[in-house]
Amino acid sequence: MITLLARRGRAVISFDQLQRKARLMQMPAPDPAILARKAEIVARLLQILPADAVIHDATETRAYECDALTAYRCPPLAVVLPRTTEEVAAVLRICHDEGVPVVPRGSGTSLAGGALPTADSVILGVSRMNALLEVDYDNRLVRVQAGRTNLSVTDAVAGDGFFYAPDPSSQLACAIAGNIAMNSGGAHCLKYGVTTNNLLGATVVLMDGTVLELGGPYMDAPGLDLLSVICGSEGQLGVVTEATLRILPAPEGARPVLIAFNSSEVAGACVSDIIRAGILPVAIEFMDRPCIRACEDFAKAGYPDCEALLIVEVEGSPAAIDDQLARIAEIARHHDPIELRESRSEDESRRIWLGRKSAFGAMGQINDYMCLDGTIPVTALPHVLRRIEEMSRDFGLQVANVFHAGDGNMHPLILFDANKPGDLERCEAFGAEILRLCVEVGGCLTGEHGVGVEKRDLMTVQFAPQDLEAQARVKDVFDPRWLLNPAKVFPLSLSQGRRAA
Ligand SMILES: Cc1cc2nc3c(=O)[nH]c(=O)nc-3n(C[C@H](O)[C@H](O)[C@H](O)COP(=O)(O)OP(=O)(O)OC[C@H]3O[C@@H](n4cnc5c(N)ncnc54)[C@H](O)[C@@H]3O)c2cc1C
């Protein structure tokens, strides 16, 4: 139920551990009839796609065995890399006809195992579908093929003073398809919302090859809001091939301020006071001492020496920025910060954000860790941070915190030694406790990384049986044979029962 990242340059996870994890993951046994027909299925795929778009050799499919949740791996039956919606529809028709499961894949940066294959499934990767189809400044939108990377959308319009707001820290690599499937967020989503708030339309292909056009170049499309159903559905309902995205005019200016505290709890209290005051910064990010150290080493951002740090960014005209920062400083002073420092230059601001956005990678350079993703009401931050500290002592494992504090989306990183017997299991137990705590205080199991395989069996902590059943019925409608992205999101007992029925 936890994201496991490996320490660089070290064989962190032994084969034994991988085997043990694989058993714990309980993926459904592959269908032997499908495995036996592999050559036949590949031959059919080769009839509709060029040879370089169908990968079936075991050494070449290795790159697709896992996503960024690297602890869980499985070689797929085959990988297909179509270039158009029509090719996607043709692939899905064949797989539907053959009863072969399909796992949609963007760039494979999921931290929840969302793109993990099963041995009898075909990975449908959209990385070659990366065209910019339309830029319409008058109506403030762009249309892209879904394999286009997140950052390249902003890059395409930045020269004309526009940007695409959702900014996952993985934005250099992750695809719009994955962002839509996971309803991804980022540091600057406090003000602008997450993917669903910036998505106007999508082309979606159902498992039987039917092509749907949802939403369009306008707000509030008539009829049932199926676009919202697709956004965040983690590849369970259809394959997204194109998207219409809202772009925004870039602000006149932006400036972050660093506010340093002697305790995480006090920093948490400061966050809710800023929000309560009615100020809406673009971002309020939190880092504690272990993360600050790692990010400082990496980015030389000039972070203060403190227990907890808030990065608060505001934007607008120079006068609006000064006014907001003055109000934020006044609120912060009530919490006795040990330092409060505004960025003094573009370069300093860039380094402040580089450090924050590199946090996962920087921590991975110095420690093995598991990354959690849960959301809580902002007012619960001080309580939850205190409880995590207590649990950290109980479990005997250190935690580093780095998260989007403004919207209560937490990412505790549990530090451990992958080579020490028992550490991994303690991490998993600790992680599950933290996620239960998130639900207990009125929050939820995920904020932006999705459920995937990681949290599917914790869904019963969040949802009553009738709630899960209602969600399963939606899947029944879009994918009646439960062939799309198997063994994800729903508790395994539920999805296997449905598949067999
Ligand atoms: C270092 C790092 C930092 C990160 N920071 C953030 C962050 O700040 N915010 C955040 O939200 N996430 C973050 N993530 C998680 C990840 O980047 C996001 O979930 C991202 O949206 C996944 O995009 P992807 O293209 O890599 O999707 P993949 O990993 O390929 O797939 C993710 C899910 O989307 C489904 N999917 C993929 N393509 C399609 C499609 N065409 N149609 C339907 N379903 C599809 C897959 O089946 C899977 O369930 C981070 C990850 C890393 C490694």
Image: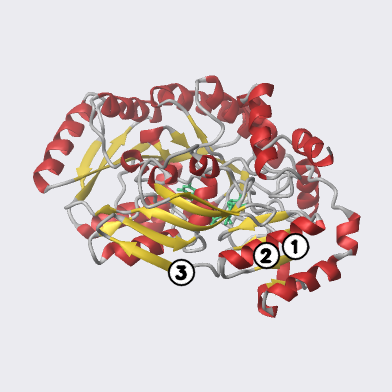
In percent of width and height, residue 59 lies at 75, 72
Please indicate whether residue 426 sits to the left or right of residue 308 in the image: right
| Residue 131 image label | 3
Question: Is residue 75 at all visible to an observer of this figure?
Answer: no
Q: Does label 3 or label 1 sit earlier along the sequence?
A: 1
Label 1 packing within 10 angstroms: few (<14), some (14-19), many (20+): some
Residue at the image point whose x is 57% and y is 29% from the top:
434
* Quarter placement of the C terminus: top right
Task: Give the labeled residue for mark 1.
Answer: 94
Which residue sits furthest left?
319
- Structural distance between the alpha carbons of marks 3 and 1: 25 Å
User: Separation of disc 2 and disc 3 at Cα?
Assistant: 20 Å
- Which amino acid does the dot numbered 1 rest on? Ile
Residue under label 2, please give it. Answer: 90
Judging depth in this view, the residue of 124 and 419 nearest the camera is 124
Q: Position of residue 122 (x, y in %)?
A: 73, 60
Image x and y of residue 357, in percent:
41, 52
Dot 3 alpha-carbon crowd within 10 angstroms: few under 14, some 14 to 19, many 20 or more: some
